[in-house]
Structure formats: C-alpha cells, structure tokens
Image (tube, grey):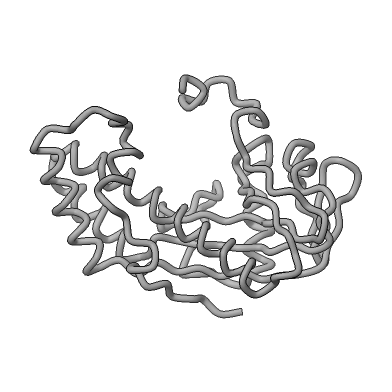
Amino acid sequence: MDDKHLAYSKIELSPAEVLKEIGYGESLPDCEVLEAIHQLLDLLKREVQPRYRYWISEGWIEGTTAVHIQNHVLNTGPTISRLLEKSSSFAVFAATAGLEFEQIIQEHKKTDNILVHYILDIMGTAIVEKVGDYIESKLEETLPDMLHTHRFSPGYCNWHLTEQRKIFSLLGNRPCGITLSDVCLMNPIKSISGIIGLGKEVQTRKYACQYCELETCYKRKK
C-alpha cells in the first residue's frame, strides 16, 4: 500500500465554498473577511499537498455492532453497522490535508489574528473532506460494478476514537505521514480515517443528524 499525492487543483476550494462553510448563507461578508479568504486561498494553491491511502478487503458484519476485516474486529457500534448493511467488502482509508497545511497552521498560530485562525480551520476541514470525496469517486471508477456506502470514521456514533489504531494497523505504518497520539488524535490535525462499505446491494446513506445520537452537536440547530 502506497500513499497517493493528490494535486490540490483537483479539489481546489473556491471563495464561495469557504463562505458557505463559514455560514454566511445569503449575507455578504465585509472586506476584511474577503481579503483574508483570497490571500489564504492563494497560499493554499501554492503550498498544500493533500494525500490519501486506501485498501480494500473482504469482510463481514457480525451481529449488529462489529465489522470483521482480516484479523481485526472493528467495534463500530449499532448505528454505523446498520449503515454498512449488505457490505461484502470494505475500503479502509486515511486522508490528510497534508503536512504542509499543518505547517501553515503552526506559522499562523504565532500571530494573534483570530479571524485567520478560524478561516484556516474551516479550510482545512473542507480540504480533507474533499479528499474523502475523491476517494469515494476513485472507488466508483475502479469498481464500477460495486455500490458503496458513505464513509464512516471513529469518533462518531459511539464508534470509539481508539479504534483508529486498528484502521492504522490495517493500512500500514503512518499512512500519509499521519501519526496517532496516546489518545488517538491524528497529526496532522486535518486528517480523517475510516471505512467505506462495498457491495452490490448496499445503500449510500450519508451519516447525518437522523443517525447521530449527539444531542449537543451545533449542526442540530440548522
């Protein structure tokens, strides 16, 4: 298994996408916000090098709470296991906005510009989610006869964050240069990992509020 470098131009963020993620909706931002967004987007275009790695293996769902892949048992919990129903194999993945993006974040942390810190955080999340979308598109391209579920990650829907150790074990040492802390937080911070179910009868049901049990999530207000 090798890391894949993804040209930023394939997932490039637009100002409109950033404004939407910030939450502007139909309202217009002031000049300071727009200027900061454009300057940061120019920087990302020059510096950012996203990466991803995925691996496909046969597996099965045991009962209602676990997924077996090779000699690993992923205790995904009942919600995610239900969303993976009818999967006959699984794509295990990791993706990151990249070490270069992490360096940009660290450099800007030396300043007191809270606005820039906030916009960079939003951009990093959007970039790595776009890399996740790209992985799904690659699965559709390489496995045209298979359907796939949405991607699901440890840390959500009672799938414990420590389960990332199993995903990293399946993917090999330090996929995409990502390391895990003692409490299984990823570095670079703008990284994701998880699984995607594959099969001829699976349904692509996105992880959304109707499946989530976190009552305090801010997105429930939308």
Write the residue at 62% across / 46% down. Answer: 154
Q: Position of residue 111 (x, y in %)?
A: 13, 45
Where in the figure is residue 165, as x and y percent of width and height?
Answer: 64, 57
Q: Residue furthest left?
A: 31
Please give the count of numbered marks on the rendered protein. 0
Depth check, front residue: 42 or 165: 42
Q: Position of 105 compared to 82: left or right?
A: left
- Check the image and name the residue furthest to the right: 63
Query: Which residue is located at x 77 percent, y 48 percent?
Result: 84
| Residue 113 % position (x, y) | 14, 40
- Which residue is at 19% across, 54% downward? 40
Side of 87 where 127 appears, left or right: left
Quick check: 4 above or below 156? below
Q: Which quarter of the rendered picture does the N terminus lie within?
A: bottom right
Question: Which picture quadrant has residue 7?
Answer: bottom left
44 w.r.t. 22: above or below:
below
Residue 88 position, x and y percent, is: 84, 61
Q: Residue furthest bottom?
A: 2
Which residue is more in the foreground, 165 or 18?
18
Residue drawn at x 67%, y 31% is 211
30 to the left or right of 204: left
Left of 119 or right of it: where is 209? Answer: right
